[in-house]
Image (cartoon, helix red, strand yellow):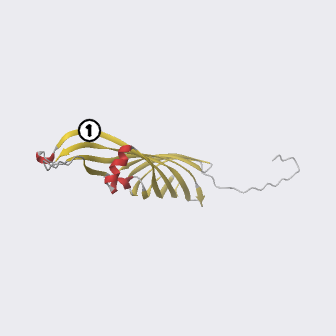
């Protein structure tokens, strides 16, 4: 507005609370998988882009597959998969909706790449003590999942927020080995999909 001498101007506008910040946070996730999370992201004009990391706790399972039962000797040969969920990498996009001065609600959608590693071995029941007769060595596989979540933040002081984010994950794609091992275990099948809640600080 250009104001000239002896003249009066009036301008009206509606202000909207915006979210522009770079942030980092950490928390604990409970649900279909338990673990510690860390993430970082940015809000720009309320649009949110975020990358994160999940370190699962005590996510391991062993499955046995009978591969060649012997009628004559009465022994069986089993393939053993001893696997654990090592970690997961996440990426999210969302939109932050400020709710008053201290709250912000951010619906998110994204992907999670789960990394599964373990050992494959062969056990012959005819061998004393049942020790592996042939070690196949280390093996790895992956599961690509999608996720939707809603993060609610409460900021009691400047630059610090307490967060709570329920989410639902689902499987998009699996490696061939992942398809095999989850057929033998409900636990493995549920590692990478289902309901969870993450609480933490940002």
- Comparing 158 with 126, the one in front is 126
Lateral position of residue 73 relative to residue 154, left or right: left
Q: How many numbered tags mark residues here?
A: 1
- Comparing 51 with 69, the one in front is 69
Q: In this view, does 36 lie above or below 140?
A: below
Q: Which residue is drawn at 38% across and 44% down?
A: 176
Q: Position of residue 111 (x, y in %)?
A: 48, 48
* Residue 121, quarter of picture: top left
Does residue 174 appear anywhere in the picture?
yes
Q: Where is residue 91 in the image (x, y as percent from the top left)?
A: 49, 46
Residue sitting at the far right: 6
Lateral position of residue 111 relative to residue 58, left or right: right
- Comparing 2 with 35, the one in front is 35
- Comparing 139 with 85, the one in front is 139
Does residue 154 appear anywhere in the picture?
no
Lateral position of residue 41 relative to residue 183, left or right: right
Q: Where is residue 76 in the image (x, y as percent from the top left)?
A: 18, 48
* Residue 190, quarter of picture: bottom left
Q: How crowded is mark 1: few (under 14 residues within 10 Å), some or many (20 or more)?
A: few
Residue denoted by label 1: 137
Q: Is residue 164 above or below residue 84?
A: below
Residue sitting at the far front: 72
Lateral position of residue 38 relative to residue 79, left or right: right
Q: Residue at x 43, y 48 (%)?
A: 38
Dot 1 falls on a residue whose secondary structure is: strand
Q: Position of residue 94 (x, y in %)?
A: 56, 51
């Amino acid at each position: 507005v250009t104001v000239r001498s002896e003249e009066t101007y009036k301008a009206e506008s509606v202000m909207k609370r915006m979210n522009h910040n770079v942030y980092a946070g950490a928390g604990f996730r409970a649900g279909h998988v338990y673990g510690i999370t860390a993430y970082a992201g940015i809000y720009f004009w309320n649009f949110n882009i975020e990358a994160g990391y999940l370190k699962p706790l005590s996510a391991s399972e062993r499955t046995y597959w009978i591969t060649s039962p012997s009628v004559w000797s009465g022994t069986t040969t089993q393939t053993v998969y001893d696997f654990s969920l090592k970690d997961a990498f996440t990426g999210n996009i969302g939109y932050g909706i400020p709710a008053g001065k201290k709250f912000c609600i951010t619906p998110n959608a994204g992907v999670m790449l789960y990394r599964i590693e373990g050992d494959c071995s062969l056990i012959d029941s005819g061998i004393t003590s049942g020790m592996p007769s042939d070690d196949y060595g280390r093996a790895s596989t992956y599961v690509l999942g999608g996720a939707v979540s809603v993060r609610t933040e409460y900021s009691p002081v400047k630059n610090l927020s307490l967060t709570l984010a329920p989410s639902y994950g689902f499987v998009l794609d699996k490696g061939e080995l992942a398809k095999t091992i989850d057929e033998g275990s409900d636990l493995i099948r549920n590692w990478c999909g289902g309901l969870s809640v993450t609480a933490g600080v940002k």
